[in-house]
Image (spheres, rainbow, N blue to C red):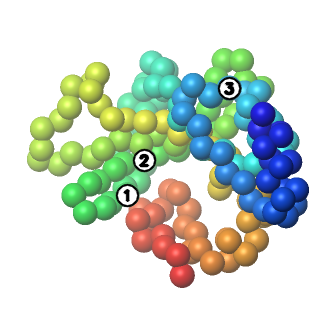
Amino acid sequence: MIQRAVRAIRASYREEVPIIVRMDAGFLDQAIFERCEAEQVGYICGGKLYADIKAVAAGIAPNLWSRFERPGQVWQYVEWADRRGSWKRFRRAIFCRPFYEGRQMLMDFARPDNLIYTNLGMVCRLTRSFGRLAARISWRPLRSSNASRARQR
């Protein structure tokens, strides 16, 4: 399905158009990621919060977390390379959680923590294919605490 959609988009628009697919955790699958990578398609996929993922996040020192701030909302995030049991290679994983300071915390089962797998921001042909789009956007590394300042020019 991805291959057909990509071919249709590129045939009717242009061959080098950047395509990004957003998926929920139900599509967390190595075969889908490999197809996207083969077609030079970016992906952003929700991840499942397995116990080992929560353990990795819990074990990361507080000073390694970055912050993203919006009015009335602050998120902490950290990234690492993750490889699920059957995956052939590691993929970029970004763990995000709300930051509470002086406010009531949520019970573990109600937390809005989330995990994202993506190939965006990786040094590869796909990232370079963004061409003019990348030239118009002020990109900042994800680890930067200034990530909230990234903006379009």
Left or right relative to 34: residue 122 = left
Q: Which residue is mark 3?
A: 29
> Relative to residue 104, is residue 75 depicted above or below?
below
Q: Are marks 1 and 2 in contact (CB under 8 Å)?
A: yes
**Amino acid type indicated by mark 1:** Phe
Q: Is residue 98 visible?
A: yes
Residue 63 visible in the snapshot? no
Tell me the SS state at disc 2. strand
Residue 35 in which image quadrant:
top right
Given the image, on which type of amino acid does mark 3 rest? Answer: Asp
Q: Which of the two labelled residues, at mark 2 and mark 3, occupies the earlier sequence position?
A: 3
Sequence-wise, the earlier of marks 3 and 1 is: 3
User: Please, what is the three-letter code of the amino acid marked with disc 2?
Assistant: Tyr
Name the quarter where the N terminus is drawn.
Answer: top right
* Residue 83 in the image: above or below residue 100: above
Label 2 to label 3: alpha-carbon separation: 23 Å
Residue drawn at the location 68% of the way across and 71% of the way down: 133
Which mark is first along the chain, 2 or 1? Answer: 1
